[in-house]
Amino acid sequence: MAHGTVGWIQVDTDDPEGARRFYGELFDWTFAADPNSDAYQLMTRTGADQPHGGLLDTGGESQNRATFVIVVDDVVKAVAEAERLGGTVVNPPKTTPNGLTFADLRDPSGNHFGVFTPPAG
């Protein structure tokens, strides 16, 4: 995926069954358990060979929202540039054991979004 493209959609909800039904019927998405999390399901567009997003069961502990996540070449650099342009950091850059690096931000108007760099390879 190229720098600056939407690479993931994150749906946080306190009603995962309702969200699966809504998005599944509206967009023909399917859902599968994430082997790394009991609270997370992977969303896949019918006919696609890999997931394009995730559905998080918040258990009511955080707000319901849908977040777009943008592919960037360098998460740390993107976070610094976002701050320079008036954005704020919600969750600072983090790298998972498999090499995925991500961060959560807000634009100057308060809209939540994310940035990530996929694992190498």
Image (cartoon, rainbow, N blue to C red):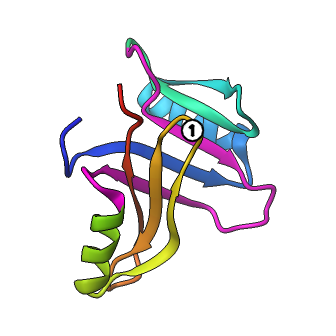
For the point 71% across and 32% down, the residue is: 36
Question: Taking 14 as reference, is 85 above or below it?
Answer: below
**Side (left or right) of 104 relative to 97:** left
Q: Is residue 89 magenta?
A: no
For the point 24% across and 35% down, the residue is: 1
Q: Position of residue 71 (x, y in %)?
A: 30, 48
**Side (left or right) of 36 relative to 27:** right
Q: Quadrant of residue 64?
A: bottom right
Q: Position of residue 47 (x, y in %)?
A: 38, 11
For the point 42% across and 31% down, the residue is: 27
For the point 34% across and 84% down, the residue is: 109
Q: Is residue 58 magenta?
A: yes
Q: Position of residue 43 (x, y in %)?
A: 53, 30
Question: Taking 102 as reference, is 118 above or below it?
Answer: above
Q: Secondary structure at mark 1?
A: helix
- The C terminus lies in quadrant: top left
Observer-nearest of 99 and 115: 99
**Side (left or right) of 81 relative to 47:** left
- Magenta residues span 48-75
> Given the image, on which type of amino acid does mark 1 rest?
Phe
Observer-nearest of 8 and 75: 75
Observer-nearest of 17 and 114: 114
Q: Position of residue 18 (x, y in %)?
A: 68, 42
The residue wearing badge 1 is 22
